[in-house]
Image: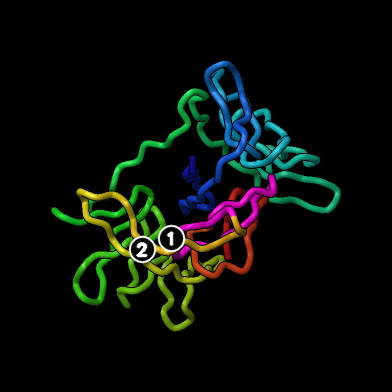
Amino acid sequence: RLRLVCFNQFGNNYCFILYPGNDVPCNETAACPDGYTCCKTKDGGWGCCHHKEAVCCKDFEHCCPKGTTCNLPKKSCDDDLGSVPWVEKVPTIPRKDVQLQVKDVPCDGTTGCPDGTTCCKTQQGGWACCPLTEAVCCEDHLHCCPKGQKCNLAAQTCDDGLLSVPLAKKIPSIPRKDVQLQVKDVPCDPTHACPDGNTCCKNTADIWACCPLPEVTYCWLFSGFVCF
């Protein structure tokens, strides 16, 4: 089964799809996706770190890649070569039922978008789906940007004052009575694929995941999936 994993980094929401693998058991009832690490939470439960064999930070909220040290004052992961931002943990999944139950995002009375996407108007006055949560719909009615960023149509980027990422292309909306999205897959290899409008990227566990941006050239894996 495919799993949709979403997280917030630098004020923006990012989602990617994990393909089937062996879950990492935390206890008898909770587990983390393959390639993740189980870390204790403040309330005594479990959370999942985006790194394989990760270092669980003492604040019970963050984690760092293997071989680095949690720097709580600086909110970073340090080693002899430098520092990278630390990562917030994501919720665990039930071990006996890992299927993600998602709900459509309604655009109007008859049209919707898949969970984790945003409804945006098309040039024809209809609806399309931006593959980002709470996205900004660009004025050209063709593209969209992550929450908190501005559409720079001239440069074809999404800007927030600190960095720029490529504009995301919208995908077709779906009838609300039929949640199956008819799009062409993007092949990663002979056995794995990503939805149309996404880019195949390897995660820290060398597993295929999907960046919700088209034709991405760089994936920053140290903080989950920030794609450029």
Q: Which residues are magenta?
A: 191-210
Question: In the picture provided, is 178 more to the left or to the right than 26?
Answer: left
Rendered position, 132 above or below 216: above
Q: Residue at x 40, y 58 (%)?
A: 131
Secondary structure found at label 2: strand
> Where is the C terminus found, in terms of image quarters?
bottom right
Where residue 23 sits, quadrant-wise, is: top right
In the structure shown, which secondary structural element does the residue marked by tag 1 occupy? loop
**Residue 208 rendering spot, x and y as whole percentages:** 61, 52
Residue 146 circle label: 1
Question: Could you tell me if the residues under marks 1 and 2 are in contact, i.e. CB atoms within 8 Å?
Answer: yes
Q: Is residue 178 left or right of residue 129?
A: left
Q: Is residue 188 above or below residue 85?
A: below
Q: Give neighbour class at mark 2: few <14, some 14-19, many 20+ (Cα, 10 Å).
A: many
Q: Quadrant of residue 169?
A: bottom left
At 45% across and 65% down in the image, what residue appears? 197
First in sequence: mark 1 vs mark 2: 2
Task: From the image, tell me which residue sits under label 2.
Answer: 136
